[in-house]
Image: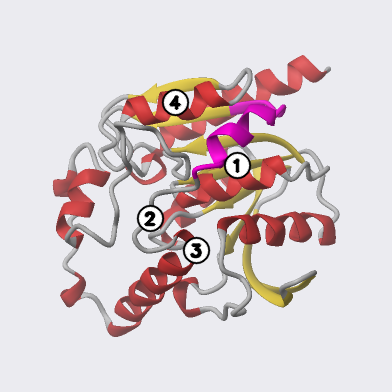
């Protein structure tokens, strides 16, 4: 884990903790509301079997990391990661985001960062689809949130009260940061769906067929908003495919990146 300091107009200095794994084609992997632990194992898998260089930042405020008071939105986080790619002089980067990480990835793609070449949205949230609301993590019990997140939740049940104190503190920090970035209660960004019509990067929208945080029709609407996006359902999978069916996700990303690169050759 390394700490990188960035300077953003209107925000000021931002410290970002980044795990940097492997070597090869570059991927920026953005975690969801469960924090960086929710993508750590998948980052290892992608780095070792693709092979790839995988950067997994911790969104400022998550896992107890510092967050500037002026950094309060998904769009702000997207600007942070555009600056990170520029500072690291990275190009031809595939951005992968799960849940709110997908929301941030979509905002990052819309910024037109020259370092970003393609986007993978995995159970992304952020748009508003009438009749298909996203589950509000602040309005339902933690146990129900877990149940909605997995095809087979029995293998992933956690009782926060039994966790070590550092893990409980990290979860509390994650929840507090999530409330700031997405708002409480969260209804998404009513402008994002229309703005996505201007996104011209190769985009893959991956969705678990058993996702009950955002249902499959919500996922299809996400893909339909993006010109030439490809929608792919993942069998026996919920809201966090990188945890529940990581090999399916890795294979889908590998196929997508190779196909996108071939079109550019």
Q: Does the magenta stretch include residue 202?
A: yes
Task: State which quadrant residue 207 falls in.
Answer: top left
Which is more toward the observer, 20 or 161? 161
Q: What numbered label is drawn on residue 181?
A: 3
Q: Is mark 1 on a helix, strand or loop?
A: helix
Q: In the rendered structure, are the residues bearing label 3 and label 4 in contact, judged by CB atoms less than 8 Å apart? A: no
Q: Residues within 10 Å of mark 3 (few under 14, many from 20)?
A: some
Q: Total marks drawn?
A: 4
Q: Can residue 251 be seen here?
A: no
Which is more toward the observer, 87 or 248? 87
Give, as a single range, the part of the protein colored magenta.
190-203
Measured Cα–Cα span from mark 2 to mark 1:
17 Å
Labels 2 and 3: the sequence-earlier one:
3
Numbered disc in front, either 2 or 3 = 2
Residue bearing the label numbered 4: 221
Q: Residues within 10 Å of mark 1 (few under 14, many from 20)?
A: many
Q: In the rendered structure, are the residues bearing label 2 and label 4 in contact, judged by CB atoms less than 8 Å apart? A: no
Labels 3 and 4: the sequence-earlier one:
3
Q: What numbered label is drawn on residue 106?
A: 1
Residue plotted at (33% across, 38% down): 214
Q: Residues within 10 Å of mark 4 (few under 14, many from 20)?
A: some
Measured Cα–Cα span from mark 2 to mark 4:
18 Å
Measured Cα–Cα span from mark 1 to mark 3:
15 Å
Q: What element carries label 3?
A: helix
> Compared with residue 241, is residue 64 higher up or lower down, i.e. above or below?
below
Residue bearing the label numbered 2: 186
């Amino acid at each position: 884990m390394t700490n990188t300091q960035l300077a953003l107009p209107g925000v000021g200095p931002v410290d970002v903790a980044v795990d940097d794994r492997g070597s090869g084609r570059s991927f920026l992997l953005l975690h969801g509301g469960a924090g960086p632990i929710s993508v750590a194992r998948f980052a290892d898998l992608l780095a070792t079997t693709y092979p790839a260089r995988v950067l997994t930042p911790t969104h400022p405020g998550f896992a107890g990391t510092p967050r500037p008071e002026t950094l309060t939105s998904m769009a702000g986080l997207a600007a942070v990661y555009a600056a990170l790619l520029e500072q690291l002089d990275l190009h031809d980067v595939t951005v992968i985001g799960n849940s709110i990480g997908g929301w941030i990835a979509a905002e990052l793609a819309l910024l037109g960062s020259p370092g970003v070449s393609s986007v993978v949205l995995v159970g992304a949230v952020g748009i508003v689809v009438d009749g298909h609301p996203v589950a509000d993590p602040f309005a339902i019990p933690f146990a129900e949130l877990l149940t909605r997140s997995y095809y087979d939740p029995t293998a992933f049940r956690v009782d926060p009260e039994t966790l070590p104190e550092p893990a409980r503190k990290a979860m509390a920090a994650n929840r507090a940061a999530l409330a700031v970035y997405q708002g409480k209660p969260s209804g998404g960004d009513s402008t994002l769906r229309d703005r996505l019509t201007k996104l011209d990067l190769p985009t893959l929208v991956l969705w678990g067929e058993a996702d009950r945080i955002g249902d499959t029709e919500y996922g299809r609407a996400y893909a339909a908003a993006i010109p030439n996006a490809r929608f792919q359902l993942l069998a026996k999978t919920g809201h966090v495919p990188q945890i529940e069916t990581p090999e399916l996700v890795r294979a889908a990303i590998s196929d997508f990146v190779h196909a996108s690169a071939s079109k550019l050759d």
